[in-house]
């Protein structure tokens, strides 16, 4: 009997060995270019805005900055289109996609940790070139130039090792940097108003001694003309249709709350401050859409707000523009963008920054129309319009 | 489809294996117990002695010639051959390497160096890449805890435990000293000399001194490529891994004493290193410049004494001082120059009393009672530990956390006929103190006391056969680390411990023969179910990019099995062939949030299938070794979508060594790793080296 048991067990040992051998034939194969995934969402819409791109940031070090595209004509959401459109680019779009804008027939993607601005054909998403700018953050345009903020200015020689930031001016014709202008500490968004460039300095590396100024750059000379003191840890700056600038402050996360400020570029004075926290914003017509998360140290969770402010009256019109209760599905609102023609509202959810995000489309009345899975950390949306489309095809 | 079919076949094979074993088990159970009992009575003394050595809890061990035959630079390289283990390796000689046992997370593994745990109160991570194999004689991995009740309370305190044992002096043929000098050199610019000196101070006091220096420039080629659906190459890039250089020195001195009824040892350890952190390879960034300096020093000692028949005591003590500096000089990123210093003081005392059995404390009992008592071995033990940790750092708003931990464990062990059983309960009492810069007095936090049990059973149905059925249950936790609790802005003082619960059932069979071709067969198989509750995860918080908060949010369930098999053949002409294989299946599911797409997904970097196989052939002084490590497909996130997919990787390593039995003795070895030059990442964007090799010469006087 014992001998039998022994034989059985020996047999099982050898079948185990052979099973292991079989397992080991489950091999590596060639790594494919990640294919585009397409899904149908919403109804087809035909107007001048033919679609939008969404830039997914991707967590730092993951090299997972990706581009998604939504086509209104076919109501198709295409996930991760860059790799297939540019299969010959090693390591694809890059690491941490921070900003995305379409200017003329081209799209510019600011890829923060890949230290570059990727320049693409806005219609085909084919790569045209890149501009190397270390630690680049945000982009804006004026005339033939693109302006890109960067954290990577000179480091002070003293113990603080404080590092001033700069704005690079890129000639969109030849994609060369033809000038730089030093600004404040860790400059983030920038916007052009009244012939000047306004740069929100955060000082994010210097916590708790944040920067609190907006740098004003004279575009003609491309030098910093002055600083406007606004509030700690500035982030967003956008111009409205009245020529006013809206600047958001992140606060210091402790005693100084996040707020929204208005600057008059004619006087370069802060004209108003609103007790509205802003993580993401978009201005369409008279409406400033803002969503924000504020950490509640007592409840140990984020408090999320979805606000609409009238840029003419500065009144807060709505404290929750999502009206059907579906905001509970959103863990971490990260980007808000409004289609200027249909007034559909897009809110992205970055989840826990590691899992794939979501994009939610709301009707102008704040009811959820559709939702789609995005890449990791959906961060920026840029609309593609038909006229530009024509400009290319002609 | 092909893969599916293969997996199916694999599962079928496994089921067949298990079924065969199950049948075997029932056959044994049903066998004629009477005759076995008879045999048991006849051979009682011998059997008892042998059974004591057999562990209640499954252990995986690498030691002696088998360990030497495997080509391993660091402890992490050796641990790959164990089942149930997943290694995280960032690539290169100096890179960080951690292991995760049965998917519970690397923070749940306790790593013990010569009997005392290597701590890291700051972040709980022990980098196994820092521990060289130079002087390691044995590596043992226990799931649950070590199969021993005479041990410090700390040894009960982890979900899995890795014991690293350095060489103890041994003097053959009346020698009073040993001297051995080793030189290793290889790819990555590796130069790795070491020296070992052992001296017999007196008959009962031995000294050992060991020093090692490691240098490597750490550069190697790596290649990334992608193909189009039609099979043509989309892009194909080869580059050189930079900033992977390492320079490390290690020195150890140990004194070992032997007493009539006890033993003691004291050990001093010093390690210092500087290394580059090669970083992630991402688009447009092919090199990084971050640096790290480590300095680890400790003194530790153990004293074990039999106080009286049936009563043993051991005392352990340690002081350690660890300094780590991290520098980011890259001006395209935030400048960082952080220095952290950790200190630890540890004291432990353990007692064991044999209540029943041959060595029972009860001596003055009449002969008949004694015979009865000796039927059963029953030991109890009590141990108490105290530990103090302090962390100093140069961060803004640093709170200088300080922790006092008291651990108390009670354990018992019974051997009765066919059954061996162990049970233990561990009490953990933690008192923290932080020193906020704005406050003059420290703030105290008392963590809730924790009591965690473990039960282990082993049953030997047939006394003549080394066949065991076993099962265990263990509940344990890991305390939130200083970083989890108090790191500026990220820490969360209200964090609860992260609990793991393990259920394991398994079989083991060993058979040896004195003659014939097949000399030994050993098979071990375990199935297990683990839960990780209150998993500590970072979640984003508030308004701003990448601001995190630690929370007790995660829940993971792990179902798996580990199988180990080995066999030794004595072929003719003194040729000894040993074949060993380990296989692991794990389904480790993220069950944190039913509303998320990650719900039910396989957690990051855990393959469903993994395994290893080694073949060793020895002929006199010549040893030829082949080793194969396989890790199946994985996802780098619990969202198991194509964008997160990671391919399988597997490496073939070969080594040849030859021992010249001259005086002084000479040992030569050549190792070639990743023979087929596979280009792979274990961690996304951290390319591993392709084919690499090393030569070793050792002279022993």
Image (spheres, rainbow, N blue to C red):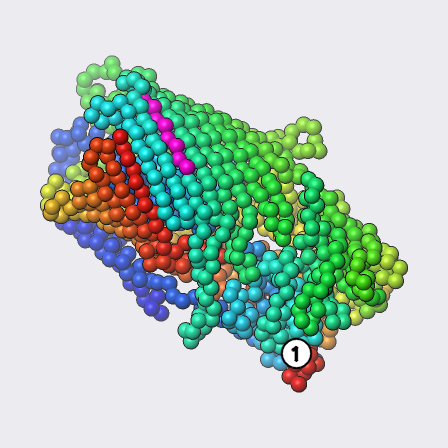
Q: Is residue B621 visible?
A: yes
| Magenta residues, start to end | B206-213
On the image, the x and y values in percent for residue B328 come to: 59, 46
Q: Is residue A109 magenta?
A: no
Foreground pick, A380 / B385: A380
Q: Residue at x 60, y 57 (%)?
A: A113
B206 to B528, vertically: above or below? above
In terms of image quadrants, where is residue B17?
bottom left
Q: Residue at x 52, y 51 (%)?
A: B279
| Side (left or right) of B483 relative to B613 | right
Q: Residue at x 52, y 61 (%)?
A: B597
In terms of image quadrants, where is residue B401?
top right
| Side (left or right) of B281 relative to A189 | left
Q: Quadrant of the N terminus of chain B?
A: bottom left
What SS does tag 1 mark?
A: strand
Foreground pick, B396 / A306: B396
Q: Is residue B142 visible?
A: no
Q: Chain of mark 1?
A: A
Q: How many marks do you count on the picture?
A: 1
Q: Quadrant of the C terminus of chain B?
A: top left
Q: Residue at x 49, y 52 (%)?
A: B242
On the image, the x and y values in percent for residue B686 come to: 47, 54
On the image, the x and y values in percent for residue B440 come to: 70, 28
Q: Is residue B207 magenta?
A: yes
Location of mark 1 (residue): A50
């Amino acid at each position: 009997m014992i001998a039998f048991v022994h034989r059985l067990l020996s047999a099982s040992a050898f079948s185990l060995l052979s099973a292991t051998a079989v397992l080991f034939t489950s091999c590596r194969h060639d790594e494919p270019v990640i294919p585009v995934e397409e899904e149908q969402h919403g109804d087809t819409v035909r107007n001048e805005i033919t679609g939008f791109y969404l830039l997914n940031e991707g967590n730092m070090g993951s090299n997972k900055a990706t581009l998604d595209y939504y086509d209104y004509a076919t109501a198709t959401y295409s996930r991760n289109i860059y790799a297939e459109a540019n299969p010959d680019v090693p390591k694809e779009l890059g690491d941490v996609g921070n900003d995305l804008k379409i200017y003329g027939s081209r799209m510019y993607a600011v890829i923060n940790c890949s230290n570059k601005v990727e320049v693409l054909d806005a219609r085909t998403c084919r790569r045209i070139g890149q501009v190397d700018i270390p630690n680049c953050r945000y982009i804006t345009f004026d005339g033939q130039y693109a302006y890109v903020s960067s954290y990577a200015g000179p480091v002070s020689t003293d113990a603080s090792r404080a590092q001033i930031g700069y704005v690079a001016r890129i000639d969109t014709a030849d994609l060369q940097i033809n000038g730089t202008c030093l600004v404040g500490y860790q400059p983030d968004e920038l916007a052009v108003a009244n012939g000047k460039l306004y740069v929100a300095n955060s000082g994010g590396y210097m916590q708790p001694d944040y920067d609190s100024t907006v740098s004003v750059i004279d575009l003609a000379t491309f030098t910093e003309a002055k600083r406007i003191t606004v509030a700690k840890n500035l982030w967003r700056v956008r111009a409205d249709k009245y020529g006013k600038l809206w600047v958001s402050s992140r606060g210091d996360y402790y005693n100084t709350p996040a707020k929204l400020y208005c600057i008059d570029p004619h006087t370069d004075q802060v004209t108003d401050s609103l007790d509205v926290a802003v993580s993401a914003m978009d201005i369409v017509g008279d409406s400033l859409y803002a969503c924000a998360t504020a950490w509640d140290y007592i409840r140990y969770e984020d408090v999320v707000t979805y606000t609409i402010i009238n840029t003419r009256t500065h009144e807060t019109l709505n404290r929750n523009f999502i009206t059907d209760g579906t905001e509970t599905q959103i863990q971490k609102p990260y980007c808000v963008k409004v289609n200027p023609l249909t007034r559909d509202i897009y809110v992205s959810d970055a989840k826990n920054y590691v899992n794939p995000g979501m994009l939610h489309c709301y009707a102008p009345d704040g009811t959820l129309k559709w939702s789609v899975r995005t890449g990791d950390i959906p961060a920026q949306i840029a609309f593609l319009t038909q006229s530009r489309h024509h400009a290319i095809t002609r | 489809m092909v893969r599916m079919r293969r997996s199916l076949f694999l599962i079928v094979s496994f089921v067949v294996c298990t079924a065969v074993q199950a049948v075997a088990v029932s056959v044994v159970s049903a066998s004629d117990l009477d005759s076995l009992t008879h045999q048991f009575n006849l051979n009682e003394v011998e059997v008892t002695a042998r059974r004591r050595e057999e562990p209640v809890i499954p252990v995986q061990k690498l030691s002696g010639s088998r360990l030497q035959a495997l080509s391993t630079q660091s402890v992490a390289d050796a641990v790959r051959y164990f089942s149930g283990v997943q290694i995280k390796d960032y690539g290169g000689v100096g890179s960080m390497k951690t292991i995760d046992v049965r998917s519970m997370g690397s923070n749940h593994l306790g790593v013990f160096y010569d009997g005392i745990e290597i701590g890291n109160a700051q972040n709980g991570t022990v980098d196994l890449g820092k521990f060289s194999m130079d002087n390691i004689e044995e590596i043992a991995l226990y799931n649950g805890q070590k199969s021993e009740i005479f041990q410090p309370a700390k040894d009960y305190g982890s979900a899995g435990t890795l014991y690293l044992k350095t060489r103890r002096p041994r003097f053959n043929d009346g020698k009073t000293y040993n001297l051995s000098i080793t030189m290793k050199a290889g790819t990555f610019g590796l130069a790795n000399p070491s020296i070992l000196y052992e001296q017999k101070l007196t008959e009962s006091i031995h000294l050992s001194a060991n020093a090692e220096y490691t240098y490597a420039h750490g550069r190697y080629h790596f290649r990334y490529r992608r193909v189009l659906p039609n099979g043509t190459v989309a892009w194909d890039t080869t580059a050189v891994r930079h900033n992977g250089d390492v320079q490390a020195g290690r020195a150890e001195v140990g004194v070992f004493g032997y007493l009539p009824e006890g033993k003691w040892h004291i050990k001093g350890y010093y390690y210092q290193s500087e290394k580059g952190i090669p970083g992630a390879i991402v688009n447009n960034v092919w090199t990084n410049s971050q640096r790290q300096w480590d300095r680890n020093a400790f003194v530790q000692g153990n004293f074990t004494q039999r106080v009286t028949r049936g009563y043993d005591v051991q005392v352990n003590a340690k002081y350690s001082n660890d300094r780590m500096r991290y520098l980011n000089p890259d001006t395209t990123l935030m400048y960082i120059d952080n220095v952290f210093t950790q200190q630890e003081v540890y004291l432990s005392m353990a007692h064991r009393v044999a209540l029943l059995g041959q060595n029972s404390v009860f001596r003055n009992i009449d002969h008949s009672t004694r015979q009865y008592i000796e039927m059963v071995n029953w030991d109890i033990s009590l141990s108490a530990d105290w530990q103090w940790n302090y962390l100093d750092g140069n961060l803004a708003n640093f709170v200088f956390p300080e922790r006092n931990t008291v651990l108390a464990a009670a354990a018992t062990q019974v051997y009765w006929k066919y059954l061996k059983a162990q049970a233990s309960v561990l009490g953990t009492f933690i008192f923290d103190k932080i020193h906020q810069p704005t406050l003059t007095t420290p703030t105290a936090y008392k963590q809730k006391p924790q009591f965690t049990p473990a039960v282990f059973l082993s049953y030997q149905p047939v006394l003549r056969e080394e066949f065991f059925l076993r099962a265990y249950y263990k509940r344990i936790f890991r305390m939130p680390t200083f970083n989890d609790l108090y790191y500026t802005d990220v820490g969360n003082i209200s964090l609860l411990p992260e609990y793991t619960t393990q259920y394991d059932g398994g079989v083991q069979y060993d058979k040896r023969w004195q003659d014939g071709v097949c000399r030994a067969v050993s098979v071990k198989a375990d199935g297990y179910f683990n839960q990780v509750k209150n998993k500590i995860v970072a979640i984003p918080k508030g308004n701003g990019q990448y601001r995190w908060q630690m929370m007790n949010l995660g829940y993971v369930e792990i179902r798996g099995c580990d199988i180990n098999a080995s066999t030794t053949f004595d072929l003719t002409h003194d040729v000894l062939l040993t074949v060993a294989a380990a296989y692991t299946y794990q389904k480790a599911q993220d069950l944190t949030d039913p509303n998320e797409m990650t719900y039910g997904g396989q957690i990051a970097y855990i393959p469903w299938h993994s395994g290893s196989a080694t073949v060793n052939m020895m002929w006199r002084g010549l040893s030829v070794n082949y080793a194969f490590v396989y890790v199946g497909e994985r996802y780098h996130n619990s969202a198991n979508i194509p964008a997160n997919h990671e391919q399988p990787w597997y490496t073939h390593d070969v080594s040849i060594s030859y021992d010249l039995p001259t005086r002084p003795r000479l040992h030569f070895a050549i190792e070639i790793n990743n023979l087929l030059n596979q280009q792979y990442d274990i961690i996304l964007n951290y390319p591993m080296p392709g084919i690499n090799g090393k030569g070793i010469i050792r002279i022993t006087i």
